Image (spheres, rainbow, N blue to C red):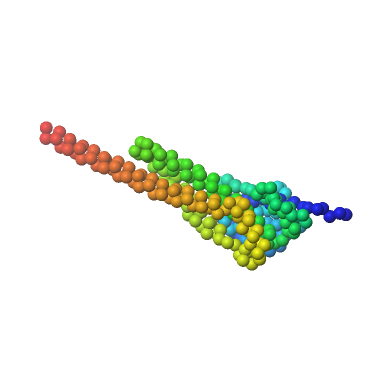
């Protein structure tokens, strides 16, 4: 039987939670899916021929060569390992073409390789997991940015914040939560160990994929927006406190005037 000239491995990535418990996920992959553990951090398990699963402690998971029903089953089984699940999933995909005739891809959605190795799987899963994690934060920050921008614009236009205190407190709280969580997760986006141990080709592959997915530019854009959100949150809080103080001043003035009027009426 003639060996096919090429083989496609579809890679799908999902960002599902703030973090994954890797030890618990490892036990499930071994016991429920007969996974062979290739790496522990990030967690990379082989579950069949050219089939792998990568699980990352910042809440992303990557599937190599799995059908959608298999992916759904795995995500459901690993649900208990996902800490603080996201309100919405972010997802992305990539295609690995195993072929003897290498060529440059037409876009950023595929890669041509001569063989599928653990190191290549590691690099692809790292870049794709980071990309899909950034996609989630991009959407979350966009929502947060829009909410605070509305309050600041109203303040600039009308001289006061019209939203009630409870709504504003929720918006500011969400902004601070996003800022803290992002600071933690971006710290995990340092150069991975595989870059140093995998040799020149792996280093070049990592840098190439990182450029194609614009990881550095997207991280900088997110950090800039987070900085603006942080300043806006501080400003909104200070204005909210000023409005509250002004209301208390008026209450005190009214009480004093009431006492004066009652005293005056008493004399009369």
Quadrant hosting residue 154: top left
| Residue furthest top as drawn | 268
Residue closer to the observer: 265 or 253: 253
Quadrant where the C terminus sits is: top left
Residue in the image at 64% along x and 51% along y: 13
The percent coordinates of residue 145 (x first, y second) are 47, 44
Q: Examine the rendering and report whether any part of residue 72 can be seen.
A: no
* 115 and 183: which is toward the camera: 115
Residue 140 in picture, x, y percent from top left: 52, 46
Q: From the viewer's perspective, is residue 130 above or below residue 168?
A: below
Residue found at the very far bottom of the displayed protein: 197
Rendered view: 50 above or below 229: below
Instruction: Give how far across and how far down residue 264 sits, in percent.
Output: 14, 35
What residue is drawn where x is 47% and y is 42%? 146
Total of numbered circles in the picture?
0
Name the residue rendered at 55%, 61% in the picture: 190
In the rendered image, the residue lying farthest to the left is: 267
Question: Residue shown at 86%/54% (left/top)?
Answer: 2
Residue 240 in sight from this viewpoint = yes
Q: Quadrant of residue 61?
A: bottom right
Quarter containing the N terminus? bottom right
State left or right for residue 170 relative to residue 78. Answer: left
């Amino acid at each position: 039987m003639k060996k096919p000239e090429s083989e496609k491995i579809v890679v799908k990535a999902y960002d599902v939670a703030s973090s994954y418990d890797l030890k618990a996920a490892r036990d499930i992959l071994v016991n429920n899916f007969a996974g062979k553990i290739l790496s522990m951090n990030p967690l990379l398990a082989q579950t069949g021929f050219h089939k792998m699963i990568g699980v990352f402690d910042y809440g992303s998971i990557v599937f190599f060569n799995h059908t959608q029903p298999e992916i759904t089953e795995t995500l459901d089984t690993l649900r208990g390992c996902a800490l603080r699940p996201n309100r919405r999933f972010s997802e992305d995909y990539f295609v690995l073409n195993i072929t003897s005739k290498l060529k440059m891809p037409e876009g950023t959605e595929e890669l041509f390789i001569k063989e599928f190795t653990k190191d290549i799987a590691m690099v692809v899963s790292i870049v794709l997991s980071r990309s899909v994690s950034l996609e989630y934060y991009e959407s979350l920050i966009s929502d947060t940015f829009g909410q605070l921008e509305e309050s600041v614009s109203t303040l600039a236009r009308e001289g006061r914040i019209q939203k009630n205190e409870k709504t504003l407190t929720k918006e500011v709280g969400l902004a601070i939560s996003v800022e803290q969580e992002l600071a933690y997760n971006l710290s995990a986006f340092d150069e991975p160990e595989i870059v140093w141990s995998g040799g020149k080709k792996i280093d070049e592959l990592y840098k190439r994929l990182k450029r194609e997915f614009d990881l550095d530019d997207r991280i900088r854009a997110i950090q800039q927006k987070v900085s603006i959100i942080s300043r806006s949150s501080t400003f909104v809080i200070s204005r909210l406190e000023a409005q509250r103080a002004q209301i208390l001043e008026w209450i005190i003035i009214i009480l004093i005037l009431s006492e004066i009027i009652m005293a005056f009426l008493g004399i009369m």
